Structures are given as C-alpha cells and as structure tokens.
C-alpha cells in the first residue's frame, strides 16, 4: 500500500511540474515561432509591411482580407526604440506584445485625438530618455523583445494604395535622442 501511495504522490507531483512548465513555456514557444515567421530575415527594429492577405495567407492568425498589416520585432537590448505610426482612415490600431504573447499596449486612431502615434519603448526598468520628444508616449516593455502589430482598414484597392504609401513612413528604429 505504501508503494501505491508513493507512486500516486510522485505521479501528481510530476504532472504538476509538467503542467506548470507547459503553461509557462507554450506561449513563449508560440511567440518565438511567430516572430521568426513574421520577421523572417528582416532586421529587428524595422517595420515589415505585408501585402493584403488572401485566402492562402497565414503570417497572422486568421488574417482579415480588408486589413493591411505591418509588423516590427522590437529589440530593446541596446536601448530604447522609437515607434511612429502615421494614422490612416478609416481605422488604424497599434498593439505591442511580449515574448509570452501578452498584449501590454494598444492604441487606435480614436485614442490619439487624430495625432500620429509616437512612442518611445523602454526596456524593463530603464529610465525615460531626457531628450524624448515632447509629444511622445513613453512605454515600458515587460520584456527585452516585443512584437508591434499595426492594423489598418483598407476598404478598397484604391484605399490600399494610399495606405500602403502612408505606412512606409512608419518608424520602428533605435531611439536617437
């Protein structure tokens, strides 16, 4: 009987350890794969502007065919990163995600009062640069790497052409104060 109790307790302890390890590791593995797939061979701290999705596109999970996506893999290991996103009608949203898939920042054109989104993203525990632009919003990232996802509604091919031109003016680059 003592062997059975020991076996059951050991099994439950092992199951608990495996469960906790899985819950912690799974989101990080997913985001690592997503960052490699989306970022590809593109350098960190630079936007990649994707074409409008088709029924075959899967760079973003379940992409919407009327959204123009832009992504930037943010690497804060060498200092703050400046993100500037010009807004486009009828809708623009910007979201930042940690390496564990947690969304830690989101804004859309309705939140900015019509102004372009201007961010300085800091590494965990970093202090605000003294020479940060006056209108820039300071965001402290919880991880040293992040993913920026910009979504813009493109209601037609003509609208997409305009959006595509405007979004090339987006900035995701090391902050040069």
Image (cartoon, rainbow, N blue to C red):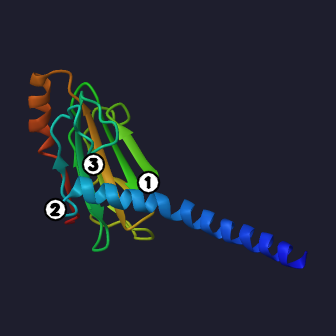
Q: Is residue 12 left or right of residue 83?
A: right
Secondary structure under tag 2 reads: loop
Work out whether 167 lies above or below 33: above
Quarter holding residue 145: bottom left
* Callout 3 crowding tier (Cα within 10 Å): few <14, some 14–19, many ≥20: many
Residue 139 visible, this orientation: no
| Image quadrant where one finds the C terminus | bottom left
- Give the mark, 1 or 2, whose residue is nearer the N terminus: 2
Q: Nearer the viewer, residue 100 or 132?
A: 100
Q: Residues within 10 Å of mark 1 (few under 14, many from 20)?
A: some
Q: Element at badge 3? A: strand
Q: Residue at x 61, y 67 (%)?
A: 18
Q: Name the residue at 43% across, 68% down.
A: 124
- The image shows residue 73 at horizontal and vertical percentages of 27, 58
Q: Position of residue 127 (x, y in %)?
A: 40, 69
Q: Report x, y in % for residue 89.
A: 22, 26
Q: Which mark is residue 118?
A: 3
Pointer 1: what residue? 101
Disc on the earlier residue, 3 or 2: 2
In the rendered view of the protein, which quadrant contains the N terminus?
Answer: bottom right
For label 1, the SS is: loop
Q: Is residue 22 visible?
A: yes
Can you identify the residue that label 2 sits on?
A: 41
In the figure, residue 95 lies in which quadrant? top left
Label 3 – label 1 distance at C-alpha: 23 Å
Q: Choose the circle earlier in sequence order: 3 or 1.
A: 1
């Amino acid at each position: 009987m003592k062997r059975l109790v020991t076996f059951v307790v050991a099994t439950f302890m092992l199951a608990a350890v495996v469960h906790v390890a899985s819950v912690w590791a799974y989101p990080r593995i997913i985001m690592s794969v997503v960052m490699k797939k989306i970022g590809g061979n593109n350098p960190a701290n630079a936007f990649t502007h994707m074409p409008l999705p088709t029924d075959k596109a899967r760079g973003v999970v379940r992409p919407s065919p009327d959204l123009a996506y832009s992504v930037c893999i943010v690497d804060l290991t060498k200092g703050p990163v400046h993100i500037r996103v010009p807004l486009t009608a009828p809708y623009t949203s910007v979201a930042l995600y940690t390496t564990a898939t947690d969304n830690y920042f989101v804004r859309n054109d309705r939140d900015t009062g019509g102004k372009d989104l201007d961010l300085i993203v800091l590494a965990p525990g970093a202090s605000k640069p003294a020479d940060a632009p006056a209108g820039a919003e300071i965001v402290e990232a919880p991880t040293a790497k992040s993913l920026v996802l910009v979504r813009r509604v493109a209601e037609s091919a003509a609208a997409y052409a305009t959006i595509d031109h405007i979004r090339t003016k987006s900035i995701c680059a090391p902050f040069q104060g």
